[in-house]
Image (tube, rainbow, N blue to C red):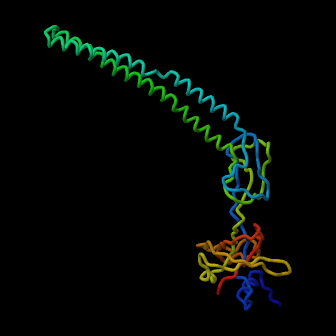
């Protein structure tokens, strides 16, 4: 009876054999993808996004109709002006009392001079002091009353100010801001469509640096460390390889079963560790492309 080897057994035999060109681990390339969604609701008035194009971080690539938000902001501003129009004019009212006090102070000085010349009585001085005291109390009371009115009106405008801040935030959210520099992978909507909050608009990924996720056995774990440089290979034409270098950026702390792409029960029970290798993309690497690594022995 002729013995047959499973794909995983062949892979391990090939990797551990005497071929210096055998790969130590296999996997697929991936990139960090971001799905950009609408943060407002309304008609998509502008949308400058096309699949395959490069977009820079923090670039406005679209806008959602914000007419109603602008009108609401104007209405709130008008309400604030209406409330503040009731604000009392403190200066003139207090100036009248202040002038009366100054007049009485002059009269007091005149009476004091007359009293020294025995041309006035102490009662006249007492009367003028009493009048000044009354005016000073009136000044304090009026000032306090006016400040209370002003504080009350300002308190009325605070909720309106908060609502304006909310509308400003909603206006900012009506702009479609691209979150990362990268390449548009998929476009989900077109200009003119009505979108709701949370609706996906497009998918983008930074393809300048890719991640090759590979799986190694427990016996290889001691050969891998963070920051380690490894050789990365991908298939090229005529059975050749395209080679570049990468750096190990992550090693799983726990083992897992062999990925489901291995079909037989025996292969699925093998425990392996996931490893991520960061690779600079020269334009040849694509998401989902198979790759392999060679560890330094």
Q: Is residue 168 positioned above or below 98 on the image? A: below
For the N terminus, the image quarter is bottom right
Tell me if I can see residue 129 in this picture. no
- In the image, taking residue 138 as reference, residue 216 lies left or right, namely right
The residue at the point 74 percent across, 86 percent down is: 21
Residue 183 percent location from the top left of the image: 74, 60
5 lies above or below 36: below
Residue 71 visible in image: yes
Q: Residue at x 65, y 84 (%)?
A: 296
Residue 272 lies, in percent from the top left, at 66, 76
- Residue 201, given in percent of the width and then of the height, sits at 74, 50
58 w.r.t. 17: above or below? above
Question: Which residue is more in the foreground, 108 or 215?
Answer: 108
Q: Which of 199 and 267 is in front in this view?
A: 199
Report the residue at 70% width, 37% height from top.
66
Asked if residue 259 lies left or right of residue 96, the reply is right
Q: Is residue 160 above or below residue 137?
A: below
Instruction: Choose between 20 and 149: the one closer to the eye.
Output: 149
Residue 14's x, y, as percent? 75, 86
Quarter occupied by the C terminus = bottom right
> Left or right: where does residue 163 sit relative to residue 19?
left
Residue 180: which quarter of the image?
A: bottom right
């Amino acid at each position: 009876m002729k013995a047959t080897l499973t794909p995983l057994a062949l892979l391990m035999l090939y990797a551990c054999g005497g071929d210096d060109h055998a790969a130590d681990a296999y996997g697929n390339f991936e990139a960090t993808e971001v799905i950009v969604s609408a943060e407002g609701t309304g008609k998509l008035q502008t949308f400058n996004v096309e699949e395959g194009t490069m977009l820079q971080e923090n670039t406005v690539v679209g806008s959602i109709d914000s007419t109603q938000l602008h009108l609401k902001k104007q209405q709130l501003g008008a309400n604030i002006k209406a409330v503040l129009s009731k604000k009392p004019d403190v200066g003139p009212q207090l100036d009248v009392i202040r002038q009366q006090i100054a007049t009485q102070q002059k009269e007091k000085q005149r009476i004091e001079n007359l009293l020294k010349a025995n041309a006035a009585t102490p009662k006249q001085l007492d009367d003028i002091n009493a009048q000044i005291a009354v005016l000073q109390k009136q000044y304090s009371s009026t000032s306090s009353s006016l400040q209370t009115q002003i504080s009350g009106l300002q308190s009325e405008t605070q909720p309106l100010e908060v609502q304006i801040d909310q509308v400003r935030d909603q206006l900012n959210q009506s702009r479609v801001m691209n979150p990362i520099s990268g390449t548009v992978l998929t476009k989900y909507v077109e200009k003119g469509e009505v979108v709701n909050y949370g609706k996906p608009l497009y998918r983008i990924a930074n393809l300048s640096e890719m991640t090759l996720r590979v799986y190694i056995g427990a016996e290889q774990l001691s050969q891998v460390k963070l920051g380690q440089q490894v050789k990365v290979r991908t298939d090229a034409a005529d059975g050749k390889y395209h080679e570049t270098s990468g750096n190990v950026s992550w090693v799983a702390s726990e083992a897992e079963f062999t990925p489901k792409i291995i079909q037989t029960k025996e292969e699925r029970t093998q425990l392996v560790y996931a490893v991520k290798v960061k690779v600079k993309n020269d334009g040849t690497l694509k998401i989902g492309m198979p790759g392999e690594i060679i560890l330094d022995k």
